[in-house]
Amino acid sequence: MIIVDTGFLSSLYKIDRLKLIKEHFKVDYIVIPSAVSAELSKTDFFTELMRHIAINEDLLDERHWILIKKSDTKIINSRLGDGEKEAISIALVEKERGALLLIDDRTARAVAKREGVMTATLPEFLLDCKEAHSLSKDELLEIIHLLAEKDRYKFNERVLRRLMAN
């Protein structure tokens, strides 16, 4: 199961590459916590995103491939937002089945890792796509450019060198 946090989803959505997650991991759907959905409801693109959202597994199909999931278990950490807490909670419940949490927030990743949850940042995801040949070098360059332009996403120099290396 691939669980996606707000920032990660928002970044890829803004550059029209959200489906890359589904395609790269060869999954039928991705999961967003209900708290992430609530956070995204405040964005300009939420109405458009809703066209891809299913509120239960029975409604998943080719068009509706983002599942909203709620978790009763809550991570208690005052430094995390509700979306991050719920994302980690869902990943914890699903970790025996190989759940992967896509999240950029450093504090949230540290909490998730302490709980034994596998995580990946956006740069790590893009590097994995590159190494698996899911993205060509030109596609990767375009994504990096679009992230900077449309999301003001900044990669550090070390990460950029790794992404651009042959």
Image (spheres, rainbow, N blue to C red):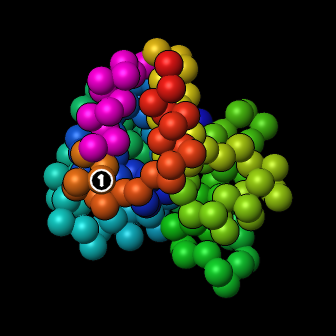
* Three-letter code for the amino acid on which mark 1 is drawn: Ala
Q: Nearer the viewer, residue 100 or 131?
A: 131
What span is in magenta? 134-145
Question: Is residue 32 at least partly visible in the picture?
Answer: no
Residue 98 to residue 92: above or below: above
Residue 112 versus residue 74 in the image, above or below: above
On whether residue 135 falls in the magenta region, the answer is yes
Q: Secondary structure at mark 1?
A: helix
Image coords of residue 105 (percent x, y):
57, 63
Residue 34: in sight, yes or no? yes
Q: Residues within 10 Å of mark 1 (few under 14, many from 20)?
A: some
Question: Residue at the spot x=54%, y=57% of the render?
Answer: 104
Q: Which residue lies at the image location 54% right of the left edge and 43% below the top edge?
A: 159
Name the chief secondary structure element in magenta.
helix
Place of residue 146 in the rendered image (x, y in percent of width and height, measured from the top left): 25, 45
Instruction: Tell which residue pokes out farthest to the top in this image.
Output: 133
Instruction: Report which quarter residue 109 is drawn in.
Output: bottom right
Question: What's the residue at 72%, 33% (across, down)?
Answer: 97
Residue denoted by label 1: 148
The answer to if 54 sits in the magenta stretch is no
